[in-house]
Amino acid sequence: MTELNITHDPAQRSWVASANRPDHDFPLQNLPWGVFAVSGDRPRVGVAIGDQILDIAAANSAGFFTQSAKVAADAAAGDALNALMALGGSACSALRRQVFEMLVEGDGVAAVRARAQSAQLLLPAGAVEMGLPCKIEGFTDFLTSVDHLSRARRSTHPQNPVPEAFYHLPLAYNSRASSVRASGHNVVRPNGQSKAGDGAMYFGPATALDFELELGALVATGNPLGSPIPVRTAGGHVFGYCLLNDWSARDIQRWETTPLGPFLGKNFCTVISPWVVSAEALAPFRVPARPRGMGEPATLPYLHDREDSLSGGLDLQLQAWLTSERMRARDLAPVRVTTTNLRHLYWTFAQMIAHHTSNGCDLRTGDLIGSGTVSGPDLESRGCLAEFQEPLHLPDGSTRQWLLDGDELVFRARASKPGCASIGFGECRSMVLPALPWPVGG
Amino acid sequence: MTELNITHDPAQRSWVASANRPDHDFPLQNLPWGVFAVSGDRPRVGVAIGDQILDIAAANSAGFFTQSAKVAADAAAGDALNALMALGGSACSALRRQVFEMLVEGDGVAAVRARAQSAQLLLPAGAVEMGLPCKIEGFTDFLTSVDHLSRARRSTHPQNPVPEAFYHLPLAYNSRASSVRASGHNVVRPNGQSKAGDGAMYFGPATALDFELELGALVATGNPLGSPIPVRTAGGHVFGYCLLNDWSARDIQRWETTPLGPFLGKNFCTVISPWVVSAEALAPFRVPARPRGMGEPATLPYLHDREDSLSGGLDLQLQAWLTSERMRARDLAPVRVTTTNLRHLYWTFAQMIAHHTSNGCDLRTGDLIGSGTVSGPDLESRGCLAEFQEPLHLPDGSTRQWLLDGDELVFRARASKPGCASIGFGECRSMVLPALPWPVGG
């Protein structure tokens, strides 16, 4: 279990001035991991601090790291986080601690030296391109919001929007790992098959394009095939968390989904935020798993979760912001479409991992686990357009049932609590591009 | 398109005597690819010939390969086929041709030299362990047999066993790549959640364990995200084919499947045959795509397939054989549970690939694409136990509705045609082991 330590202390400040702005996502207490590239160069591992990025390889070469932090920094020498993630929590924690000591304000040896060498160690975040944090090995997407499920299936299953199994297990499907991209990747509206209103078959641009506001967890160490991960240790298998936009084409999805579930309606593109906020950084924001309400069944023992620093729920606010092409042309401010919180979820990530491996299925370092759309009980917490019953009004005078070409979604998330430094996730940004003409390539 | 060439000529024989036995799966005209290991050694790429394996690295070191065949052999120097597969069809074809020239009977320079050096180049297949042929990047499983679908859903959806969409598109779901293993890997009966007859929730050993007899295709070269593969070139993206046992726990599957499709009911283990029969070796056995019957809708243009050497259907007979523990103890012969043919499938692999990428989804080298259970119209062609209405009688006096611990499944496949050398796939073998006691590890 991760205990709170000096790296969580809200009184600590960084000599990187921008990190001390109270509204900044990346204060000294966050230190998220990511992979950046300076144009043309090979991607490298970095840690975000304010509006700067600490180059881990440069700091390692300059001799800043010792003992298990040095082992971790060596593992972070490649162009992806996988080797670092595979070391597990304690090595990552050791490296986090020594990075903290480099960046903290004061007269510590590491901090004084780092500040003196900052020109070699830091890069402005605006000057680099961020990529995927790791090779995504597998991608499993869960469905853990009862509010999302009941709203999204209201029109197709008015009698029984929430299948009984939802209350007994965290529903999930294998999603597609190959088409996961980092924030900034714009999604091309997919072509696909669906049934027109008159019953005729149709192949062409999807008309019901939607976003889904999710949180993703990246797996640090996996398990051998046939060796389930018990719920009480499952949280320790999470390296960190990112924002996730599970782009969805509802018309394609609806037509293809019986009996095998979502496929082409989802696998054309998924976008995640490039900065991975470590499980350790989020430890102060753990909350108990969502209590079961009246009439909700007891959880089977293999899924019993409890609050501690690694399992349990997370008090994390998530938001989705939309701009249309016309809004951007007129310099209109983005519209906040969703404000929600991860604590609304019916199942925790520890429960998802325990369930996922309960049949012996093996997880691997680099697996991405999506929470499913993070919706809550209030109307403002609807995490995708499929939950809306009324059209969404935009300040450019237009309305949306589904997304139009040129619409851009930006997701943000922030954990705040009295007595703690507030930390954020940066952004997950992606715009809708027009469909390709068909047939492609003749 | 692959034309027929000397490597398909049934008159050619090998100086490896076992390859000329008419019943052998691996005659000179087959030359399937695989990865073998001699105990303790690093795995290496080989080609099966009769009961021997040609060590590609040894042949390459001995200077047998030239030009693009040499490039291909260099790419096959690792411990998996991925780099070779990524070169695409013509390089693999060039290497196949030069391997053929080494192994053919007669006085060709390569053959005479290879025969003289056979002690360095060949290993008895019985002396090695076969592994997965490549790193499996992604695993997509289709559902393309109308006979399978209508029988398997008969009890749960008697009015409408075949959803309308089946006739318009090849149904599929993302399956789990991490738990794919090579023949010889025994499956541990999964624990899982299901609803007992009295409505009580249950977590424990799955009671409805089943096999599914499938053919798998391995992707050679993929496509960039957003660039669909048209059906007319889709066949050229297949490196080769293997047998696939999609182990399924029907009780887990039934309970979890709405609305997201199969998950834990499938992802505990999938077993494939280690030898990959190349698309080129199977070229003589191409047949037209299954014609549409009365009342079956026309296929949308993006899925129009036609017969040629790379797309179209395949005339390939597949069989499943079962033994129980008691049958093996009493030396009773295996029972043939299924005899079926790939030509029964409603959709071809070219159609599956074109559909899979039609929304822009990217395939990658090493992706595994399952055909879905290969069932046909006759009772003997039922490709899994879920299609059986009567119990299966075994010669040890017992019956099966579902598989019991100790049951072993062996799949085989063979392509035969007058005027052609008959080729086979070797075997895909896997036995059911008892479930782990729960909780695992406390």
Image (cartoon, coloured by chain):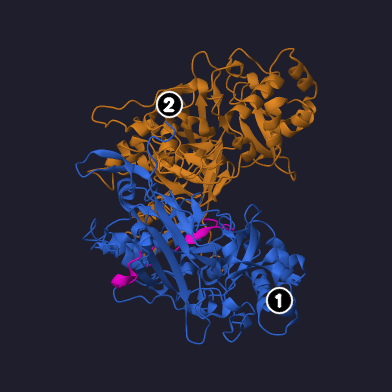
Chain colours: A orange, B blue
Residue at the spot of label 1:
B115
User: Could you tell me which residue is drawn at 37 percent across and 63 percent down?
Assistant: B322
Name the secondary structure under disc 1. helix
Residues drawn in magenta: B361-383
Q: Nearer the viewer, residue A302 or B263?
A: A302
- Residue A312 numbered mark, or none: 2
The quarter of the rendered structure image containing the C terminus of chain A is bottom right
Vertical side of B288 occupied by B260: above or below? above
Front one among B198 and A375: B198
Predominant SS along the magenta part: loop
Could you tell me which chain the residue with mark 1 belongs to? B
Please rate how many residues cluster around mark 2, counting C-alpha atoms within 10 Å: few if below 14, some from 14 to 19, many from 20. Answer: many
Q: Can residue A16 be seen in this view?
A: no
Residue at the limit of the structure toward the front, as seen here: B330
Q: Can residue B334 be spotted in the picture?
A: yes
Q: Position of residue B294 (x, y in %)?
A: 29, 76
* SS state under label 2: loop
Q: Which amino acid does label 2 sit on?
A: Gly
Q: Where is residue A433 in the image (x, y as percent from the top left)?
A: 54, 51
In this rendering, the answer to whether A160 lies above or below A295 is: below
Q: Percent x, y for residue B192? A: 35, 43
* Residue B307: assigned label: none
- The reply to whether the C-beta atoms of the residues labelled 1 and 2 are less than 8 Å apart is no
Query: Residue sitting at 51 percent across and 59 percent down?
Result: B368
Along the line of sight, which residue is nearer the eye, B35 or B262? B35
- Say left or right for B64 vs B296: right
Q: Chain letter of disc 2? A: A
Task: Inspect the magenta stretch and tell me whether residue B365 lies in it.
Answer: yes
**How far separated are the C-alphas under marks 1 and 2?**
66 Å
Q: Is residue A192 magenta?
A: no
Q: In which quarter of the image is residue B321?
A: bottom left
